[in-house]
Amino acid sequence: MGMSLIVKKITQLVIGLIFLFGINIILFGHLSVGGGFAGGVILTCGFILIMLAFGKDKAFSKMKIRVSHFLSCGGAITFLTIALLGYIGGAFFLNFPDHGKAFHLHSAGFIPYADIAISILIVSSIFIIFVVLVLWGGLTKNSGKDADDEEYIHNL
């Protein structure tokens, strides 16, 4: 299923750029505008574009729901761990290992790692929300309820 051939080809052309831009925003968010949330939303938009252009089967082959659940929990636990490591320096979320050269990737201590953890949490959570909304919307729109979608929602 999915969209027309033109939409699929354009998606194939731009999806790599979308993912590269999202990763750039995540990794260099502490040096410029951006960060974990903004980069995570950009990466999620890439997965949503795949789902819209190629259908849910292609999107689920790229990002499994069970993997997305695991990543969501892992991102939250990693972020909490980074925040608790601040107690080593004296306070919650204290950025104590801030050594390095200014305006370089490793100059911000724990902030880039917190951005990566937030982006993992955001990508997986928003993707799960989108999938549930799409499947739930398909169930309420169809009077005969698609058995595969209903079973899929129950498996979430």
Image: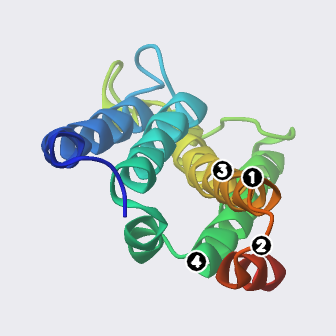
The quadrant of the picture occupied by the N terminus is: bottom left
For residue 120, which quarter of the picture?
bottom right
Query: What's under tag 2, amino acid-wise?
Result: Lys
* Residue 26 place in picture, x, y as percent: 44, 36
Colour mapping: rainbow
- Report if the CB atoms under discs 1 and 4 are less than 8 Å apart: no
The disc at residue 130 is 3
Q: Secondary structure at mark 4?
A: helix
Residue under numbered circle 1: 137
Q: Nearer the viewer, mark 4 or mark 3?
A: 3
**Label 3: few (<14), some (14–19) or many (≥20) C-alpha neighbours in 10 Å:** some
Q: Secondary structure at mark 3?
A: helix
Measure how far apart labels 2 and 4 are at the Cα level.
26 Å
* Residue 24 place in picture, x, y as percent: 31, 34
2 or 3: tag closer to the N-terminus? 3
The disc at residue 67 is 4
